[in-house]
Amino acid sequence: MSIADPNQPRARRGFAAMNPERRREIARKGGASVPGEKRSFAKDRDLAASAGRKGGEASRGGGRTREDEA
């Protein structure tokens, strides 16, 4: 496995590689691709909270534990 040369700039990928006009075009669309009736979290706060808890439990990340809250 080779190690990248720290003196060489990294290749631009994704949004960084796009021209600014293309980035603005994509950003302008925002969440417009999803119709309002399909945005369930916007309407149901409890559903959103439940999904957030599920994601936090499944993430295996460095989140807070019960001991941290005390």
Image: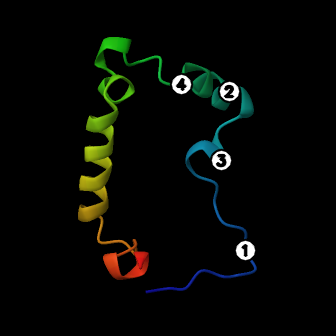
Spatial CA span between label 2 and label 1? 29 Å
Tell me the mark number nearer the camera, choosing from 1 and 3.
3
Tell me the mark number nearer the camera, choosing from 3 and 2.
2
Q: Earlier in the sequence, mark 3 or mark 2?
A: 3
Secondary structure at numbered mark 3: helix
Q: Earlier in the sequence, mark 1 or mark 3?
A: 1
On the picture, is 53 further left or further right than 4? left
Q: Residues within 10 Å of mark 4 (few under 14, many from 20)?
A: few
Spatial CA span between label 4 and label 2? 10 Å
Which one is in front, 39 or 20?
Answer: 39
Q: Residues within 10 Å of mark 1 (few under 14, many from 20)?
A: few
Mark 4 lies on residue = 30
Secondary structure at numbered mark 2: helix
Disc tally is 4
Three-letter code, disc 4: Gly
Q: Is residue 45 positioned above or below 66 on the image?
A: above
Residue 42: x and y in percent read: 39, 26
Q: Which mark is residue 16?
A: 3
Spatial CA span between label 4 and label 1? 34 Å
Mark 2 lies on residue = 24
